[in-house]
Image: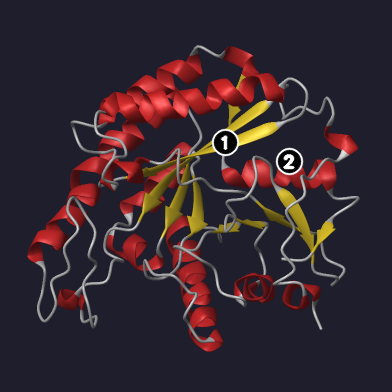
Amino acid sequence: MNPIDTLANARRFEPRDDPRLSGRRWPGGAGLALSFVLNIEEGAELSIADGDASNEAVHEITHRLDGGPDFCLGTHFEYGARAGYRRIVQRFAERGLPLTLNVCGRALERTPWVADDARRHGFELCGHGWRWESPAGMDEASERESIARTVATISRLAGRAPAGWHCKGSRSPNTRRLLREQGGFAYDSDDYGDDLPHLLDFGDGRPPHVVLPYGFDTNDMRFFDRGGFVRAADFSGYAGDAIAALLPESRRVPRMLTIGLHTRIIGRPGRIAGLDGLLQQVAGLGDAVCVMTREAIARAWLAAMSPAPRSGA
């Protein structure tokens, strides 16, 4: 049986202290790699108006409307596509910074200009499921179809297949095997347990699969957490504190940090200054940090670490 399945429950908590990490740098010489991820989910949310059995419950408020369309919810998501998206992307394009877009297939169908921008600015498109829903409860056939349909849509609209995948919430026990079967994936982001990537060996003779940890704390979704971020400066301050903590560590061994963004959240006028402040901080750090797409991080890590992959899920 494939080790990706047999070791699925063999949880390992020890630090990954690989002696090869000592003194290693990211391309260009930085010790800390920053990954900015903009989630494109608008149009892929659960909505009775779109024929779904239920509506999403979380936007600027937490409220689930059952039994009929929720037009309040719908327009909150629309704001991200109509206004928030441009406001955020402009900031990365003006600075020439790389950006990874986590795109749901159905959302990309409804906002095809996102694929046009990705080509124009060199942004990465990462698969985020066909719908904005966790595959944890899906049967295998449904999840396989979601992956294939998303890959086909990204390939058609952007001109190339995604190299990465990131589920909403938890992946299923089948996700990584299905990604391997689909082919073309270098990495997934369905991990929250480290400050560095790690490799998975499927034992099939192909290059190892890279797992890039994601982050929920350095993420604008905390504006929706009561007791989380309130003012724009809360976002830039917290993410800046994370960078400040990782920089000394990165002088000895490499580190990475993910900053998660959403068009309907940080794209609001009262919050966008948080992104401005953070980007200004990053610009002031010079060569100590590098901003990379997740694909670039994954491929750099694979090239550096592939001689001794870690087995298991």
How far is the residue under mark 1 from the one under mark 2? Answer: 15 Å
Q: Residue at x 24, y 34 (%)?
A: 230
Q: Position of residue 126 (x, y in %)?
A: 51, 55
Q: Secondary structure at mark 1?
A: strand
28 shown above or below 150:
above
Q: Residue at x 41, y 30 (%)?
A: 92
Q: Tag 2 or tag 1, which sits nearer the N-term?
A: 1
Q: Residue at x 78, y 23 (%)?
A: 252
Q: Residue at x 41, y 17 (%)?
A: 280
Q: Nearer the viewer, residue 255 or 267?
A: 255
In this rendering, which labeled residue sits more in front, label 1 or label 2? 1
Please name the amino acid that badge 2 sits on: Ala
99 shown above or below 311:
above
Q: Position of residue 81 (x, y in %)?
A: 24, 50
Classify residue 270 by image quadrant. top left
Q: Which residue does the numbered mark 1 point to in the structure image?
A: 257
Q: Secondary structure at mark 2?
A: helix
Classify residue 84 by image quadrant. top left
Label 1 CA crowd tier, 10 Å (few <14, some 14–19, many 20+): many
Q: Position of residue 135 (x, y in %)?
A: 48, 74
The answer to whether 163 appears left or right of 23 in the picture is: left
